[in-house]
């Protein structure tokens, strides 16, 4: 679902249309961002490690500080 879809859905729930001056795009975007932030906060409260990963990196060479994530073992894909 895109941000535009969320705005449209919010307007339906509010029983209004996109040209309603009481609900400009900026206000609806702020509402969506606050809802998203609260969902993430609730997830982290229930499972603090959900959005984190711990890995040991191996340098590409012994003389450089370069790390290629896709060549790590196991692969770092996120």
Image (spheres, rainbow, N blue to C red):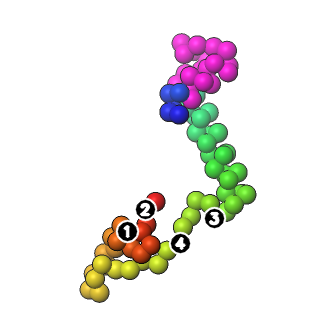
User: Where is mark 1, residue-wise?
Assistant: 69
Q: Could you tell me if the residues under marks 2 and 1 are in contact, i.e. CB atoms within 8 Å?
A: yes
- Which mark is on residue 54? 4
- Residue nearest the viewer, comparing 77 with 38: 77
Q: Does label 4 or label 3 sit earlier along the sequence? A: 3
Q: Position of residue 75 (x, y in %)?
A: 42, 69
- Helix, strand or loop for disc 2: loop
Give the quadrant of residue 19: top right
User: Where is mark 2, residue-wise?
Assistant: 77
Q: Position of residue 20 (x, y in %)?
A: 58, 13
- Helix, strand or loop for disc 3: loop
- Residue nearest the viewer, comparing 65 with 1: 1
Q: Could you tell me if the residues under marks 2 and 4 are in contact, i.e. CB atoms within 8 Å?
A: no
Few, some or many residues within 10 Å of mark 1 (<14, 14–19, 20+): some
- Helix, strand or loop for disc 1: helix
Q: Residue furthest right?
A: 46
Give the quadrant of residue 33: top right
Tell me the residue at 53%/27% (across/down): 5
Q: Does label 2 or label 1 sit earlier along the sequence? A: 1
Q: CA distance from mark 2 to mark 3?
A: 17 Å
Q: Which residues are magenta?
A: 6-26
């Amino acid at each position: 679902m895109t941000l535009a879809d969320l705005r449209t859905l919010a307007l339906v729930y509010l029983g209004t249309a996109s040209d309603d001056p009481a609900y400009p795009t900026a206000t609806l975007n702020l509402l969506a961002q606050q809802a998203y932030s609260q969902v993430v906060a609730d997830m982290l409260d229930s499972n603090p490690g959900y959005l984190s990963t711990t890995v040991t990196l191996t340098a590409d060479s012994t003389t450089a500080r370069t790390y290629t994530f896709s060549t790590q073992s196991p692969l770092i894909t996120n």
